[in-house]
Image: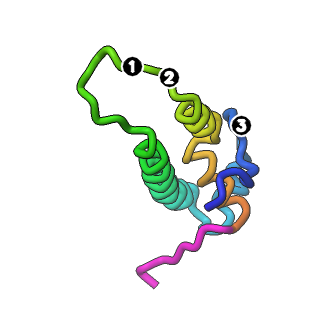
Amino acid sequence: MDLKKTNAPVNTITYNKSVIEEPTGNVYEAITIMAKRANQINSEIKKELTEKLEEFATYNDSLEEVFENKEQIEVSKFYEKLPKPHALAVQEWLDGKIYHRDSNK
């Protein structure tokens, strides 16, 4: 997933309920699917951020050596400015990028 190329909103917006429920016919089912996808996105982002921040990790127990790492700050700022996982999941749902199926059928 390329987080730089997403067009998901950073702020909260209101969506039309009928557009959300259209693919499934049930708004609750649609929300459940988007919630599961948001959890997947969140774990992907968390894993990616952890890997990037491990590059800057220092394993000293000294309190005297606290310094600012400019690259680490830039990485953190990038991830703070990203849309939230639920916004990314909703945008994917509206764009038809989320595959779902009914296991009962």
* Residue 9 within the segment the image draws in magenta: no
- Tell which tag, 3 or 1, sits nearer the viewer: 1
User: Residue type at mark 2?
Assistant: Glu
Confirm or deny contact between disc 3 and disc 1 (CB under 8 A).
Answer: no
Residue that mark 3 sits on: 13
Circle 2 residues within 10 Å: few <14, some 14–19, many ≥20 = few
Q: Residues within 10 Å of mark 1 (few under 14, many from 20)?
A: few
Mark 3 vs mark 2, CA separation in Å: 36 Å
Secondary structure beneath disc 1?
A: loop
Residue located farthest toward the left when viewing the structure as drawn: 61
Which of the two marks, 3 or 2, is nearer to us in this view? Answer: 2
Q: Residue placed at 53% from the left, 34% from the top?
A: 72
- Label disc, if present, on residue 68 of the rendered structure: 2
Q: Is residue 100 above or below residue 92?
A: below
* Of callouts 3 and 1, the N-terminal one: 3
Residue that sits furthest to the top in the current view: 64
Indicate how the structure is coloured in the image.
rainbow
Query: How dense is the environment of label 3, judged by Cα within 10 Å: few (below 14), some, or many (20 and up)?
Result: few
Where in the figure is residue 38, as x and y percent of width and height? 51, 53
Secondary structure mainly formed by the magenta segment: loop
Residue range in magenta is 97-105
Q: Quadrant of the N terminus?
A: bottom right
Label 3 and label 1: CA atoms lie apart by 40 Å
Relative to 14, is 17 above or below? Answer: below
* The quarter of the displayed image where residue 23 is located: bottom right
Which mark is first along the chain, 2 or 3? 3
Question: Where in the figure is residue 15, as x and y percent of width and height?
Answer: 71, 45
Mark seen at residue 66:
1
Amino acid at pointer 1:
Val
Residue 80: quarter of image: top right
